[in-house]
Amino acid sequence: MSRYCSRPTATPRTGAAESMEAYLHEFTNMLLRWLHVIAAIAWIGESIYFVMLDNSLRTPKDESARRRGVAGEMWAVHGGGFYHNQKYATSPEGLPDDLHWSYWKAYTTWLSGFALFVLLYMANPAFYLVNPDSAWAWAAGLSGWQVNLLALAFLLLGWVVYNELCKRLSPNMERDGLLSLAVAVMIVIVAYLSTQLFSGRAAFLLTGAVMATAMSANVFFWIIPGQRRMVKAMRAGETPDPLDGKRGKQRSVHNTYFTLPVVLLMISNHYAFLYTHEHAWLLMALFIIAGALIRQFFVVMHAGKIQSAYPVAGAALILVSLWLAMPQGGGSDTARAAGYGPSLEEVHAIVTERCVTCHSQSPSQPGFASPPAGVAYDTQAQLQQLMARTKQVVASGYMPLGNMTQMTEAERATIAAWSQ
């Protein structure tokens, strides 16, 4: 997700113009990514804080507080000061006008993330979205605009299915256990479908984006509107609809368990062993479930309970992922047994021909201002340092992207057999 390949243009441009375009593209990428990370930290941090606060509340000891409708309170110390948080079960007297609302962080996170997706993936779908190795021939043969539409439909349908599950399985928040199981199954299905429809790196990103879209849409369509109706009723002296509060709590709980998996999926593009694996969807599912289990440990801990089974189960799933993704012996061992092992010089000659047009300190591929992901193969020493990573992404077929430089199977086998 860190760089892009330029699209053909109708009229030739000067090298200076291309360099300036690449620079502005990269600068925009940096600013959007910065904004996205800042907004996500603020949103997730606030979400985690309020879950902690809600689970840490204790019945107030002061009788006057209970008469005012205070259902729970928490005393805390932080930064040299003491804080007294109170939660009202009924309409508080004199509801203030300056209520703190939590929504712009959620919207900014989603909008900046979607802008990044458009800038980096949808601008070059043939390289970053199309899955030429898909078992489904129609998916492997999609054109750029077709796979772009498919990606948008994937996000939209993900939200629609999730929302319908919530409305149909637990409309009154009385069967949330069943709903949670159904949502978990849905996410596993999303993980599988994404790896069939899109390239590996995009599949991880889009699975995370489905969850992130559900999180933001929960805020936009359910949590905030429900809260606004509650506030309006309180100020009119009416009794708020209790379903608004329950529904907001339900969707907030879902958002809580999505947070850790989404963060991992958003950084997964840095780790080729994940998205190039034969069973990438299974790795994805294991990490998603592990993240939810670990999050559950902290949720119950704030309620005063220590249930170590949750992090132990999460760690077990991560260990299963470690074992599943572990490189298998073969390539270089077989080559050595046969008395053949390509030299560093041979491998560097292949890489120079097939990879250095992009992966160089001075890329010759139009539109590149710097080496993608900071990976350069200008010297043999640089290649040697990146040996394991290079073998993995080449053997998996992920690189070169879209095989734009026409690397042959024989050349891939040579790189896979390299062991020096």
Image: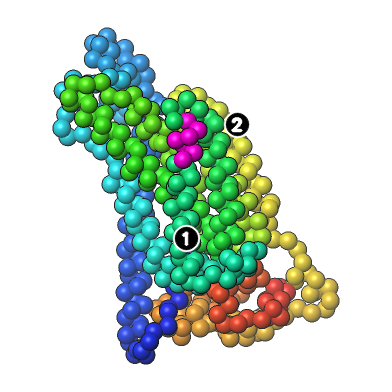
User: Could you give the CA–CA distance between mark 1 and mark 2, rounded to whole angstroms?
Assistant: 37 Å
Name the amino acid, label 1. Ala
Q: What residue type is labelled 2?
A: Ala
Q: Which residue, given by chain and number where applicable, does mark 2 sit on? A: 309
Of badges 1 and 2, the one in the foreground is: 1
Q: Position of residue 201 (x, y in %)?
A: 53, 62
The numbered dot on residue 214 is: none
Q: In this view, does 178 lie to the left or right of 2?
A: right
- In this rendering, the answer to whether 351 lies above or below 254 is below
> For the residue labelled by badge 1, is the local secondary structure a helix, a strand or a loop?
helix
Tell me the residue at 65%/56% (across/down).
279
The residue stretch that appears in magenta: 164-170
Residue farthest top in this picture: 63
Relative image position of residue 214 (x, y in whole percent)? 42, 46
Q: Name the residue under label 1.
A: 151
Q: How crowded is mark 1: few (under 14 residues within 10 Å), some or many (20 or more)?
A: many
Is 35 positioned to the left or the right of 382 in the image? left
Name the quadrant containing residue 411.
bottom right
Residue at (33% x, 47% y) in the render:
106
